[in-house]
Image (cartoon, rainbow, N blue to C red):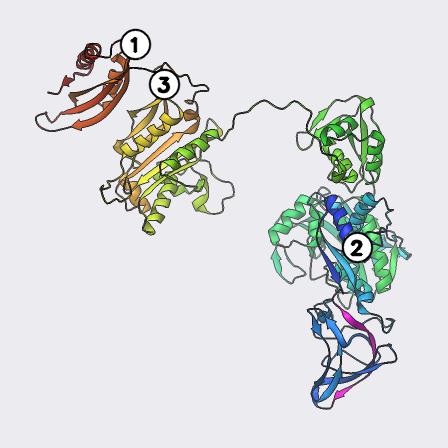
Amino acid sequence: MRVPLSWLREFVDVDLSPEDLAEKLTLLGMEVSAIERIGADWHNIVVGELLEVSPHPNSSKLSLTRVRTGVGDEELSVVCGATNIEQGQRIPVARPGSVLPGDRHIDITTIAGTESQGMLCSGDELGLTSDADGILILPQDSELGVEMADMAGDIVLDVDVKPNRGDALSILGLAREVAATTGATLRWPDLSVEESGDSTSDHLKVDIADPDLCPVFVGRYVEGVTVGPSPWHVQQRLIAAGVRPISNIVDASNYVLMELGKPIHTFDADDVKDGHITVRTAAAGETLETLDHVKRELTTDTLLITDATGPLAIAGVMGGAQSEVGDETTNVIIESAIFDPVSVRRTAFRYGLRSEASLRFEKGQEHRMARLGADRTAALIGRWGGGRVATGVVDTQPQAPAQTRVAFRPARVGQLLGAEIQVGEQRELLARVEIQTEAATAADRIPVIAGDEPLLVEADPAETLVALIPGHRRDIAIEADIIEEVARVHGYEALEGQLPNTVMPPFRPDPQRLTDRLRAALSGAGLTELITHGLIGPDDHARLGFGTDDPGTIVAANPVTLDHSQLRRSMIPEHLRVLVENERQKTPDIHAFELGAVHEWRDGQPIQTEVLGMMLAGRDRPVSHDREPGQVDVALAKGLLERLTQRLTWTRLAYEPLTPRAGVEHPGRTAAVVAVSGTGDSTIVGRVGEIHPRLLEAYGVHAQHVIFAEIRLESFNRLIPDRLRVGRLEHLPGVERDIAVVVSEETAAGQVEAVIREHGGPNLRGVTLFDQYRGAPLAESEKSIAYRLRFEFVDGDPGDEAVDPAVERLVAVLSERLGARLRS
C-alpha cells in the first residue's frame, strides 16, 4: 500500500524522519519495502503564469508563449507543442538550468528558428501523472515562483500490510499503528454531513435477500451534483497513493477507500429504477457488462446489486457500466455495504477481477465503517460536486454486533515472551491499540485455539483479565493474539534475550532417518534418485490392472489435467516415463530409485504407504576396456536389496514365488521379498521382478528387460533393531565346504537354502549360492545347485572332524526332504 506522508500527518503527528518511521512500522509488523520522494529530482522548476500564447511563426504545430515566474519579474519566451494551454493559466516552468527526472537538463535552445528559454512541463515529465500530451495545469491560486517540489512534492511509503491486518489497509489504520508506537494522538477526519431537504428513504429503498452474504447495507442520496475534476490537491494525493483520478464523484469514493479502508460504490441514481435496490445472488443465465466494458456470464452463486431491470454491480467486486457515474450524472446513490469475505474472494477469483475494493472486502470490514464511509463520501461529494445531501441514511442493520471478549492470563505473557512485563504496563500497552481490559468473571474461559473446534481452558478469575476487542481488529481471537499485541507495542527489539529455563524435551528419533540412510546407501551404490508425479491418469491404472471404477483408487476432486487426476497406486508408470525420456535422450542405461508414497482406499479410509521404488534398465555396469557389460536382471536388483538389508537391518532376505499381476509383471521372474530375522521369523516387505513386455510396449519402452522393486518402508523400518547385540568374535579361522546337489527343476533354490540353514548346526554362519547347472549328464527335469558353506567356531577344533559330520548330515536331510543327491 502506498502511503503519502502528507496524508498520514493529517491523522497523526509524525516527528520522525521517513527512515525512522519506516523502521517503526516495520517493527510493528507493517514492513516498509520502499521510500519514494516525489519531487526530490526536480531542480529549479517553479510555478509560472502564461502571459501570452501565440502561433509559432515557423511551425503550425508549435506555439510561442511568454511566461512570467514571479522571480525578479523575469519573463521567459518558451516554445511549446501542447494544445491545452491558454493565456492566464498557471503551469510548471523549467527555467534554464533546471533538472527534470532522469537527470534531464534544460537549457536555452533554438526550436524551429526561435529561441526557447526553458520548458513548460507535463505531468508525465514530472512523474506526477501519465499524461504526456498536455501541459500540467495548476490551480489558479497557485503562488508564482514557488518551487514545484514544495507545492507538489511528497514522501510515499510503500507498506506491506500482512493478510490478517485488513484494518491497516488505510491511511487511518496505519496512523493508528503510528500513534500506538509513538504515543501520539490519533485524529479522525471530519465525518459531519451537511444534510437538507427530504429524506434519503424518499429516494432509496434496499432489500437484502441473504443477510449472511450482505449483513449491512448503508445508502445515501445526493442530488444536483455537477460532475467534473476533483480539486487539484486531491488528484495529486490519489496519484501518490497509486489511484488514477477520474471525476469528483468517483474520486470521492476512492478517497474514502484509501483514507478509511472502506470500499464505496456510487451509482447514477437515474439509472436505478424507482430507486429500489435488491442485494441477491444471480439467476441462471443473467449477464452484466462491468465497468471494464466486458459482458460477463454470471454464475448462480455470484452476489449482485440489482434493481427491477436486472444486475447493476457485482457486489464487492466491480460495478456495472449501465449505472456508471458519467459526465451527465446529476443524482447519485452511495452504497456503503459489508459483504461476506469468502463470497467476495471466490467471486473476484472466478471473474479475474481482483481490485483494491475486493482486497479489503476479502479481509473483512468493521461494522461501523459502513455508516462512516457513507457519511464521509456524501460529505466529500457535496463539497467537491455541489448538490444536496438528503437527510439521514438507509441502514439495513444499524445495531452493531456485540464486542468480542478475549480472556488472557497476564502471567502467560512472561512465559511466552521470556520477559516480565507488569500487569499495569500490559494494560497500558493494549490501550494504545484501543484494546481495553477489565477483570474476568467466573464465567470467562480462556480461548487457546480458535476455529471450528475451539479449545477453551478454565482459569482463576483472580489471575485473568478480559480484553475488549475493537471492531476493526478481526485478527484477535485467542490468548496468544493478545500476547502478540503486548509484544508488538512493547517492541520486540526491547525484549532482552535469555536462554530457556524450562526442562528440555527428551530425545526424539529423527523420522527421516531411514529415508536418509536409504538415500545414502543407494546413491553410494551408483543409483540416481528420481522425484516423479504422485498423480497419474486413469490409463496408467488401467494398464496396471485397476479398472476405471476400482474402489481402491483415490481420485482428485479438482484435477488440473486428466493425466494427473488419480493418486498413484504404484511407481511403475512414472518410472517407465522417465525411462522413455532417457531413451529419447540416448541414455538408456538407468539405475534409479525413488522414495515416495502410493495411495489407495482401504476399509473406507485413504491409506498412504511410503515405499522405496527401484528401476533398472540397460547395461548392468558402465562400459569398460577390460570387462564386457551385461544386461540388468533380477539378480542385480536382489543384490542391491540384500546390500541394503545387510547394511541397515542385520537381517537377511529370502524370496518366495507369487502370482504375477497379468500384463504387468513377467511370469517366472517376479518374487515376493521376504525379510528373515535371526529367530527365523519372516515378513513380506515388498516385491521384485521384471516388467512384462506388454507393459513396456504400452509406454513405448525400447529396452527388452526392465527390472523393478517396490519395498514398503514401514515394514522395512521394523526390521531395524533399536539396539545391536554383537556376539563373541571368533579367534579361529573359518572352514568352507562346497556342495553341489541335484534336485528337480521345480525345486526352488530358496527351498534348498532354507533346509541347509535349518539343519546346518550352530556353527554354520554363511550359505552362498554360486552355481547352477543344467545339461548332460543330468536329466531334462533336473538341475544342479552348488552352495558354499562357511562354518565358524568360537571354541573347539575347526578341523575336518567337526565339519564333515555336519555336511554329511545336511546331505542326508536334503535327500530325505527334497529328494536331492550329491552331484558327482
Q: Residues within 10 Å of mark 3 (few under 14, many from 20)?
A: some
Secondary-structure class at tag 3: loop
The amino acid type found where label 2 is placed reads Val
Using the numbered discs, state the Cα–Cα distance from disc 2 to disc 3 in whole angstroms: 76 Å
Mark 2 or 3, closer to the camera: 3
Q: Position of residue 304 (x, y in %)?
A: 69, 51
Residue 596 in the image: above or below residue 348: above
Helix, strand or loop for the magenta stretch, by majority: strand
Secondary-structure class at tag 2: helix
Foreground of the two, 568 or 187: 187
Which residue is tagged 2? 256
Q: Residues within 10 Å of mark 2 (few under 14, many from 20)?
A: many
**Can residue 53 be found in the magenta stretch?**
yes
Counting labels gives 3
The amino acid type found where label 1 is placed reads Asp
Sequence-first disc among 2 and 1: 2
Q: Position of residue 48 (x, y in %)?
A: 83, 76
Q: Which residues are magenta?
A: 40-57
Q: Residues within 10 Å of mark 1 (few under 14, many from 20)?
A: few
**Can residue 69 be found in the magenta stretch?**
no
Which residue is tagged 3? 677
Residue 488 in the image: above or below residue 295: above
The amino acid type found where label 3 is placed reads Ser
Sequence-first disc among 2 and 3: 2
Using the numbered discs, state the Cα–Cα distance from disc 3 to disc 1 in whole angstroms: 25 Å
**Are the residues at dot 2 and dot 3 in contact (C-beta closer than 8 Å)?**
no
Residue 117 in the image: above or below residue 447: below
Answer whether residue 823 is visible to the viewer in this image: yes
